[in-house]
Image (cartoon, helix red, strand yellow):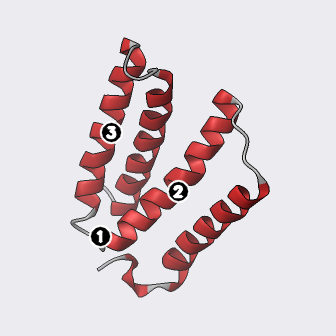
Amino acid sequence: MPASPMLLLGVAIAAEVVATTALKASQGFTRLAPSLLALAGYGIAFFCLARVMNHMSTGVVYAIWSGLGIFLIAIAGWLLYGQRLDLPALVGMGLIIAGVLVIQLLSRTASH
């Protein structure tokens, strides 16, 4: 039985967050291990994302993937690199999360 589209989307989001965090650590692809982790993470993310798009609307998939990715990468940047966000950035990310919740909870286009 194929994996659930939402599970695959979760894997795609997690892989993209790991990849983007590793991309920062790669220092412009000058460090081998983080560079390889970034490439592998993006490969996994795009593979899973492509599979999810067989079952869900492209716009909805991309909205969820990018919205949650932005939020989680901001948290990773804060925890791992001490990057801080100002109030407008936090409000904007709150709006992104609210949009993802509206799509998931209220929209009938979340799956087709």
The residue lying at 58 percent from left, 47 percent from top is 72
* Circle 1: element type: helix
Q: Quadrant of residue 75?
A: top right
Q: Answer few, some or many: residues within 10 Å of disc 3's Cα (few below 14, many 20 plus, some between 14 and 19).
A: many
Where 69 falls versus 108 (above or below)?
Answer: above
- The amino acid sitting under disc 3 is Tyr
Where does the image place residue 35, in percent across and percent down from the top left?
Answer: 36, 22
Total count of labels: 3
* Circle 2: element type: helix
Where does the image place residue 8, in percent across and percent down from the top left?
Answer: 35, 53
Labelled disc at residue 58: 1
Position of 18 compared to 76: left or right?
left
Work out whether mark 3 precedes mark 1 in sequence or the reverse, and give the earlier one.
3
Q: Are marks 2 and 1 in contact (CB under 8 Å)?
A: no
Labelled disc at residue 42: 3
Q: Answer few, some or many: residues within 10 Å of disc 1's Cα (few below 14, many 20 plus, some between 14 and 19).
A: some
- The amino acid sitting under disc 2 is Leu
Which quadrant would the C terminus be assigned to in this image?
bottom left
Distance from disc 2 to disc 1, alpha carbons, whole Å, reads 15 Å
Q: Quadrant of residue 101?
A: bottom right
Pointer 2 residue: 68
Which quadrant would the N terminus be assigned to in this image?
bottom left
- The amino acid sitting under disc 1 is Thr
Where 15 falls versus 4 (above or below)?
Answer: above
* Circle 3: element type: helix
Where does the image place residue 10, in percent across and percent down from the top left?
Answer: 44, 52
Position of 90 compared to 46: left or right?
right
Q: Quadrant of residue 88?
A: bottom right
Q: Is residue 2 visible?
A: no
Work out whether mark 2 precedes mark 3 in sequence or the reverse, and give the earlier one.
3
The outermost residue toward the right is 87
